[in-house]
Structure formats: structure tokens, C-alpha cells
Image: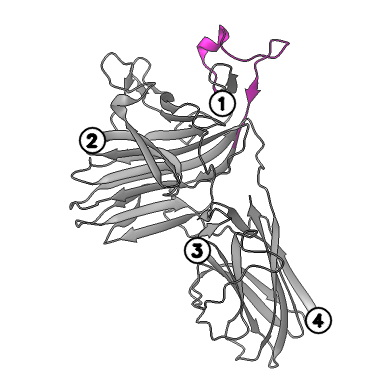
């Protein structure tokens, strides 16, 4: 796993002819076991980082989604995030990256997260971390029975405890590696290829006192995951137990080995609205709302499609200003598929606001503010491939306000990319 405490970003990856996956080059590869070209050249690949999330500045709506129940908390602590339950049953907390990793068939996807367990769990308490969304994915976990790896396929949960790992249980007895999850911070990583899941940790080598990436367990011929596009997530649960249970999260990342950095498939989706503003000049009025569906597709599974704004444009007959907010609140129920798309062809749905009777909140975080000082059918536009992603249930709301004393007629268009 590559992080601020792991190998440099120019690490050399090779294709292992035995495992059928890319991995780090090591000294034994000078002898054999590695795929070479007909000119005896090593078959190598670079790692392309898709997600690199730092914990230095705490939680941010533009990078993370969170869920909290019964008094659990998350606190920035010296560049890490502490997730802690409250001293009551049912207390839990999760933090999940807003953007998901994108699995590319024929390449390896590697997800990593730095975790330290502050105190061991008691009773029914447990923690999980890795590459998953609660319905699909894979990662590590800890409960009173010990450390385990798990996989999720449409809520079907499978886990294997440390003593039954099939590669290296990091036992310490007769083992070169020193590992104790409640004493140190470790990088835990999950590697996905076309058919396998591999779980690795970077314990300390007691001979040279350096951390090394060590394969602990693998699921072979598992068809990887049903849904390979997952967020980086960590969670703590009290269940029916009481007491405080805490873990600490460092950096998180997702990268692709053996593939291109740009792997998104981008259907181009848009929505248009016409609206007349006649309210006071200093009042922001909603003109359009877009949200990502919780479930998507004929199978109605959890919506794992990355969605981001591509372009916003507007034309007015008077001077006007515009802004787009993230995670506002729309209480109206008239959510529809975009024009010329049925419900199975767009990961999002829209509301065209014809009046201000939908109970739209202005408390969302502003992600783009555009001042359009154009009259006589002037127009304005903002375009950026990285304006913002929005997650499941995340609502984008476009607002406008007139800057003249006259009523203002607006024709606005919002375009977004759905990466599937």
C-alpha cells in the first residue's frame, strides 16, 4: 500500500505469472517466477492513484459522507480522525469517501486505509474498514473474537478470522513480522483483480525493523466483487453493548495497477428549466434540483455510480446571479428522470422548480457561485470536470437572484457525468 508512511510513488510493480496479478518487485524476482517479454524484459506497470484522501483537516462534505447514531463522535486528532461510540447501546458512526474507486477489468484495483485500534472491543462491539459501502465490498474488521477479513455481496456477509487466514496469520511465534492492531497504526489494503481478492497489512519486519507489505489472506476464483466500484469506509458499532469504543483513521487511497488512470465511462446527462424571478433582489430563489438515486438500474441495487457536475449554463434577459449548493434539502416529491431518459438509464433524478413552494433549503454548502452580469439575452457558463462529485442522496440545488429592479426570465441548463 502506498501512503505517507509506505513505499515511494515510483514503486515498481511486476506481473506475477503464478498469481496472475501485479505486485511489488522483490529480491527473489531476480531468479524467476515473474512474467517476462520475449526479449527477457520484466513485464511492469505503474500505479495510477484515483483517490487520495488526507485526514489532516477533518471531515469535509466535498470528500466524505458520514452517518452517526446515539451520540457517537468523530474528531480530528493530530492529522488523524478518531471515530468513537458513546456509552450506550446502538451507538455507531461511519465515514465513507464521497467518490468511489472504479474497478477496471483486466487491471488490479488496490484500496488502502491506515487504521489504529485505540482500545479493543468488548461485548458485541465491532469495527470494520476497507473498500465497501455496507452492501458490497471487502475489508478488515475487529470484534471480541479478533481480527478478521470480510467480503460483502448484496448483503451476503462472509468473514475469516486471523487464525484461519490462508497466507500469513502474523502470529509472532516463529514469524518474522511483529503485529498488534491495538498498539500501532497499520496500512490495511484490499487488492481486486478479475478473479481474486487479496488482503494485506504492512507489519514490522523484526530483522530489519522496516515495514513490509505482507499478504495475509486471499479469496481465489471469487470473481472479485459483484460491484467493484466502492468507497473507502470505516465504521464503529456498539450493537447491544455499552461503553466507548474508538478507532483512529489516517490516510485513505485507491489506485489502479496495470490500467489507465482515466477509466470512467461517461454518459452525458442534462436538465433544462425556464423560470421567472419576481421576488426581492436580495433573495436567492431555487430554479432546479438534482439528486443521485439511492438505488439504480433494472436490478435496483445500491447506486455505486460516481456522479459529478460537468457544466452549468444560464441565459437571462436581465442582470442576475447564480449559485449551486451541495447537500441542501428538497422536500418536494416531484422527482423525475431527466428528459429522454427512463428510470434505468440515469443514476440521477431532477425537479424543475416553477415556484418556491417546494420547501427548498438554502443551508447547503455552496460549491459554485457565478455572477452573470449580462442583459439582453446574455448568458453565462461554468465548466470544470472537477467542480464537484455528489453522493447517494446528495442534492444539488441551482439558485438565482435578480440584480435589477425588473423581473428576470431565466433559461438554465445543468449537465453532469455519470461514470458507469
Question: Residue at coordinates 33% horizontally, 23% vertically from top-left?
Answer: 169
Q: CA distance from mark 4 to mark 3?
A: 35 Å
In front of the other: 350 or 116: 350
Q: Which residue is mark 2?
A: 145
Category of crowding for the residue at label 1, using alpha-carbon neighbours closer than 10 angstroms: few (below 14), some (14–19), many (at least 20): some
Query: In which quarter of the view is residue 376 placed?
Result: bottom right
Which segment is the magenta one? 23-48
Residue 123 at what x, y percent from top left?
18, 45
| Residue 393 disc label | 3
Which SS does the magenta portion mostly show? loop
Q: Which residue is mark 1?
A: 11
| Residue 224 disc label | none
Q: Is residue 169 above or below residue 320?
A: above
Residue 227 at what x, y percent from top left?
53, 44
Question: Residue at coordinates 32% horizontally, 23% vertically from top-left?
Answer: 170
Q: Is residue 39 magenta?
A: yes
Q: Which residue is mark 4?
A: 377
Amino acid at each position: 500500500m502506498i501512503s505517507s508512511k509506505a513505499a515511494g510513488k515510483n514503486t515498481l510493480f511486476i506481473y506475477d505469472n503464478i498469481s496472475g496479478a501485479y505486485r511489488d518487485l522483490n529480491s527473489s524476482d531476480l531468479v524467476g517466477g515473474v512474467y517476462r517479454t520475449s526479449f527477457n524484459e520484466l513485464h511492469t506497470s505503474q500505479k495510477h492513484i484515483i483517490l487520495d484522501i488526507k485526514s489532516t483537516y477533518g471531515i469535509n462534505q466535498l470528500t466524505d459522507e458520514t452517518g452517526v447514531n446515539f451520540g457517537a463522535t468523530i474528531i480530528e486528532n493530530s492529522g488523524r480522525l478518531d471515530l468513537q461510540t458513546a456509552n450506550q447501546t446502538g451507538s455507531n458512526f461511519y465515514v465513507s469517501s464521497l467518490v468511489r474507486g472504479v474497478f477496471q477489468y483486466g487491471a488490479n484495483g488496490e484500496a488502502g486505509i491506515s487504521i489504529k485500534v485505540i482500545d479493543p472491543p468488548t461485548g458485541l462491539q465491532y469495527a470494520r474498514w476497507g473498500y465497501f459501502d455496507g452492501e458490497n465490498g471487502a475489508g478488515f474488521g475487529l470484534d471480541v473474537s479478533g481480527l478478521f477479513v470480510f467480503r460483502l455481496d448484496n448483503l451476503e456477509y462472509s468473514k475469516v478470522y486471523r487464525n484461519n487466514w490462508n497466507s500469513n496469520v502474523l502470529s509472532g511465534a516463529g514469524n518474522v513480522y511483529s503485529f498488534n492492531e491495538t498498539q500501532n497504526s497499520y496500512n490495511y489494503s484490499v487488492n481486486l483483480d478479475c478473479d481474486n481478492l487479496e488482503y494485506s497489512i504492512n507489519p514490522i519486519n523484526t530483522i530489519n525493523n522496516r515495514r513490509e507489505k505482507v499478504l495475509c489472506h486471499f479469496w481465489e476464483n471469487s470473481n472479485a466483487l459483484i460491484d467493484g466500484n466502492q468507497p473507502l469506509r470505516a465504521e464503529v458499532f456498539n450493537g447491544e453493548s455499552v461503553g466507548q469504543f474508538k478507532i483512529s483513521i489516517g490516510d485513505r487511497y485507491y489506485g489502479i495497477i496495470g490500467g489507465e488512470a482515466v477509466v470512467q465511462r461517461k454518459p452525458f446527462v442534462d436538465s433544462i428549466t425556464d423560470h421567472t424571478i419576481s421576488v426581492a433582489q436580495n433573495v436567492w430563489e431555487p430554479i432546479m434540483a438534482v439528486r443521485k438515486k439511492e438505488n439504480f438500474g433494472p436490478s435496483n441495487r445500491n447506486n455505486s455510480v460516481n456522479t459529478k457536475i460537468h457544466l452549468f449554463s444560464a441565459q437571462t434577459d436581465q442582470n442576475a446571479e447564480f449559485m449551486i449548493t451541495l447537500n441542501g434539502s428538497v422536500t418536494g416529491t416531484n422527482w423525475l428522470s431527466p428528459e429522454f431518459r427512463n428510470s434505468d438509464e440515469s443514476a440521477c433524478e431532477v425537479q424543475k422548480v416553477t415556484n418556491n413552494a417546494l420547501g427548498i433549503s438554502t443551508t447547503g454548502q455552496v460549491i459554485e457561485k457565478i455572477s452573470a452580469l449580462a442583459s439582453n439575452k446574455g448568458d453565462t457558463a461554468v465548466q470544470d470536470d472537477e467542480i464537484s462529485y455528489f453522493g447517494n442522496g446528495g442534492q444539488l440545488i441551482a439558485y438565482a437572484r435578480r440584480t435589477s429592479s425588473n423581473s428576470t426570465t431565466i433559461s438554465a441548463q445543468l449537465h453532469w457525468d455519470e461514470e458507469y
